[in-house]
Image (cartoon, grey):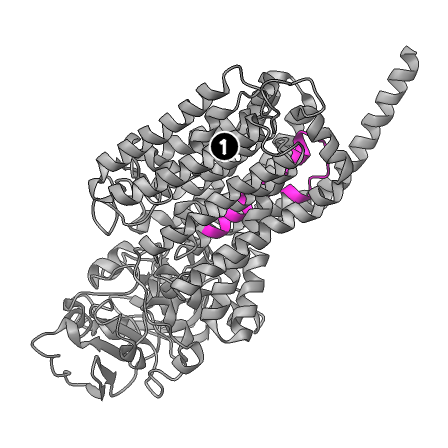
């Protein structure tokens, strides 16, 4: 790190101290420091549970991830993968959804563990805390690759998972965001290990593969930045090895990206995500003034969200020691090594302060975890090389002035937070003064001062968690009561499938007793019933318009009238076209009382929160034939989630049939043609060119299926073959280099 400013050439100099430290105790660098970083991270993450036991079980985790993992485990244990389900309608196109992690082995393992463990709450909490530990270790390795000493790399590992957005959004709710930012440092480290050190590409291949197949596009965008920066730098240096290695790494990543994201891209036109507009409504993005909050663990900044113009969470917090950069004078050589981190961090920071929507990409503050990773890595590397300054006192004054300035801007932005901002400034000032004393006043002899300073840097970050948890005990995102998955299996027991929920599912969702009658979004996967009102990130535009539904399956009260109305084109009840036999009505959405069921329907249950209506004569559930025109008949020969085989019995004048399936891109038909979708979303067939006795086959494959499968196969070939080819190439290059040296000699 640093020596005193007076005697840079003595045995206490930074370079001598680092060399001595590395030579005497390599085991501590290899094991104890990274282990300490992981253990401290797990301890801090677990300590948050003392204040809020459900800290890691909020909003999207409850309504999305928990049920999703449960369903994945259930399917895998029966030898299936979640590809497609017509019964869950707009939420059943799993490959297009992307974030189900269909191709991700880690998600497979987590899904199976979740299903076997039974207690979803405990499983999710343990997995998330473990992933924070994975992030800490990945950041440690990444910092080491940028020449940070082991103590400072460990400090970076502790500080990265403390980033405000990671803690209060990703870890609390957005699981795929947490997973992506936890694995990204590993992919980055693997890339540097491959390109800079000419090592085996296997770590990069595994980490990048896992990162991409999470299906979280923000992590993939950052990976693109990493690969692009590496390639451009290699080209500028005319380094053929680096160019070739980066190109192969990029090709592998591109192949997996095509596999995971092409279904979403080709499906987007029929969904609400099918937009190319650029807009800025100030929602979950930052302005320049918010950058002042990046060094304060207790300042919120002015980040707009569902909570209003100011989100009561320190989402912009990156590193308390940002002002301490003023204490160091990094060498040109170090700054050259840090170019990748500076470029990638700068690009991501530009996105954070950019428009809040760029096409389907929304809410750029979600890039903040990657800003944090870049900042802590740069800090660890610069602190490790800290060189004597001509004016240490001026450096201290500068650092304290930065603290005062950032605190002022934060307080001006949110004046009512001045007390907590002042507390944060005080902690920062004390920490900076202690670091300054260790660097420039010889408080502790080298090399112990190096480790002490790193411990102080990590320790201040950890101690700031105490007032942070007092001020912000949990995320601003809503938390539902914890639902027992096993007990939820019997909800709607005895009611005929398929089921749909009508009304405001958010009504009374803080009331634990309401979950004895209904579930919310992906919690329905706990139930033995087949319910369509599950979570989706790709709502089918015309379907959700018809039922005024949102992404969690909540609807307006008018949806009940729509379901029980007669479709004008077919003369069939809309609910019958959807294969619905049970309707769960949320009573709160009908302040004047739930209407009496029409003919053909009966009230099966009348609870405190819901009323359940069932069809007297159940119709076929989703996936089959919902309606045949007059004189046209077909016989179902085979029916599965992705395939429907029909035999034509007769053909009338109209010759159309309606399927109880959404008209997703990817459907093909042989023996007939597709007609205009009924109600704008139901797949409809025209049999005018068919003959009696003909067999019609309707097949669903994700759009671009063969391109995706070929891409996946090629990626697997690279995964299997590149490590071997890389090793042989290195051997050949080493022999050639040896021969060249011998010839020269």
Q: Is residue 326 left or right of residue 90?
A: right
Q: Is residue 255 visible?
A: no
Q: Is residue 734 visible?
A: yes
Q: Residue at x 41, y 72 (%)?
A: 525
Residue 71 picture location, percent across and down: 47, 69
Q: Is residue 677 above or below residue 616?
A: above
Q: Closer to the camera, 638 or 231?
A: 231
Instruction: Identify the secondary structure beneath mark 1.
Output: helix
Q: Which residues are magenta?
A: 178-204
Q: Closer to the camera, 465 or 114?
A: 465
The picture quadrant where one finds residue 152 is: top right
Q: Closer to the camera, 722 or 178?
A: 178
Q: Residues within 10 Å of mark 1 (few under 14, many from 20)?
A: some
Residue 434 picture location, percent across and down: 50, 35
Considering the image in quadrants, where does the C terminus appear? top right
Q: Is residue 612 above or below residue 154?
A: below
């Amino acid at each position: 790190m640093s020596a005193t400013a007076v005697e840079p050439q003595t045995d206490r100099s930074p370079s001598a101290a680092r060399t001595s430290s590395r030579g005497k105790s390599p085991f501590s660098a290899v094991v104890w420091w990274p282990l300490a970083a992981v253990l401290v991270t797990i301890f801090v993450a677990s300590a948050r549970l003392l204040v809020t036991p459900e800290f890691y079980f909020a909003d999207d985790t409850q309504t999305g991830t928990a049920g999703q993992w449960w369903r994945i485990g259930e399917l895998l244990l029966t030898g299936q993968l979640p590809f497609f389900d017509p019964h869950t309608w707009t939420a059943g196109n799993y490959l297009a959804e992307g974030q189900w992690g269909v191709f991700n082995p880690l998600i497979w393992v987590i899904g199976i563990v979740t299903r076997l463990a039974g207690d979803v709450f405990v499983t999710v909490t343990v997995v998330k805390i473990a992933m924070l530990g994975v992030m800490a270790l990945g950041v440690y390795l990444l910092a080491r690759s940028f020449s940070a000493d082991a103590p400072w790399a460990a400090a970076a590992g502790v500080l990265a998972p403390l980033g405000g957005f990671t803690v209060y959004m990703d870890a609390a709710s957005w699981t795929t965001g947490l997973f992506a930012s936890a694995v990204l440092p590993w992919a980055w480290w693997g890339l540097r290990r491959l390109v800079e050190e000419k090592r085996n590409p296997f770590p990069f291949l595994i980490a990048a593969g896992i990162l991409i197949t999470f299906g979280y596009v923000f992590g993939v965008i950052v990976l693109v930045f990493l690969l692009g920066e590496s390639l451009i730098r290699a080209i500028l240096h005319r380094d053929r090895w680096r160019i070739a290695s980066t190109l192969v790494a990029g090709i592998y990543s591109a192949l997996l990206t095509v596999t995971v994201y092409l279904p979403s891209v080709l499906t987007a036109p029929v969904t609400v995500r099918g937009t190319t507009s650029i807009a800025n409504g100030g929602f979950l993005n930052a302005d320049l003034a918010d950058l002042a909050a990046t060094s304060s663990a207790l300042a919120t900044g002015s980040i707009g969200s569902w909570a209003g113009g100011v989100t009561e969470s320190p989402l912009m917090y990156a590193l308390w020691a940002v002002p301490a950069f003023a204490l160091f004078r990094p060498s040109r050589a170090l700054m050259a090594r840090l170019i990748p981190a500076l470029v990638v961090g700068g690009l991501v920071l530009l996105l954070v302060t950019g428009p809040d929507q760029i096409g389907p990409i929304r809410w750029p503050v979600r890039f903040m975890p990657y800003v944090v990773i870049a900042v802590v890595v740069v800090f660890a590397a610069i602190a490790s090389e800290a060189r004597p300054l001509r004016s240490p006192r001026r450096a201290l004054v500068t650092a304290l002035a930065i603290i005062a300035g950032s605190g002022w801007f934060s307080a001006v932005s949110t004046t009512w937070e001045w007390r907590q901002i002042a507390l944060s400034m005080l902690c920062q000032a004390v920490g900076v003064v202690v670091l300054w004393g260790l660097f420039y006043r010889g408080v502790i002899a080298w090399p112990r001062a190096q480790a002490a300073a790193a411990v102080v840097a990590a320790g201040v970050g950890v101690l700031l968690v105490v007032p942070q948890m007092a001020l912000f005990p949990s995320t601003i995102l809503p938390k539902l009561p914890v639902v027992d998955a096993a007990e939820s299996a019997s909800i709607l027991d005895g009611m005929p499938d398929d089921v749909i929920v009508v009304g405001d599912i958010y009504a009374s969702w803080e009331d634990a007793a309401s979950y004895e009658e209904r579930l919310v979004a992906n919690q329905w996967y706990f139930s033995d019933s087949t319910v369509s009102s599950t979570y989706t990130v790709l709502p089918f535009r015309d379907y959700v318009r018809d039922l005024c539904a949102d992404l969690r399956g909540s609807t307006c009260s008018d949806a009940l009238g729509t379901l029980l109305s007669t479709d004008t084109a077919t003369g069939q009840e809309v609910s019958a076209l959807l294969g619905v036999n049970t309707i769960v009505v949320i009573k709160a959405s009908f302040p004047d009382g739930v209407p009496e069921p029409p003919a053909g329907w009966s009230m099966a249950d009348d609870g405190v929160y819901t009323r359940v209506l069932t069809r007297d004569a159940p119709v076929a559930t989703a996936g089959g034939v919902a309606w045949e025109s007059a004189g046209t008949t077909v016989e179902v020969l085979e029916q599965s989630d992705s395939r429907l085989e029909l035999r034509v019995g007769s053909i009338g004048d109209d010759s159309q049939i309606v399927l109880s399936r959404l008209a997703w891109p990817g459907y093909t038909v042989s023996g007939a043609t597709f007609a205009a979708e009924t109600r704008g979303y139901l797949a409809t067939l025209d049999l005018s060119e068919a003959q009696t006795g003909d067999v019609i086959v309707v097949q669903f494959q994700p759009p671009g299926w063969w391109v995706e499968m070929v891409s996946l196969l090629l990626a697997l070939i690279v995964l299997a073959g590149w490590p071997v080819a890389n090793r042989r190439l290195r051997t050949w290059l080493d022999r050639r280099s040896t021969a060249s040296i011998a010839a020269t000699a």
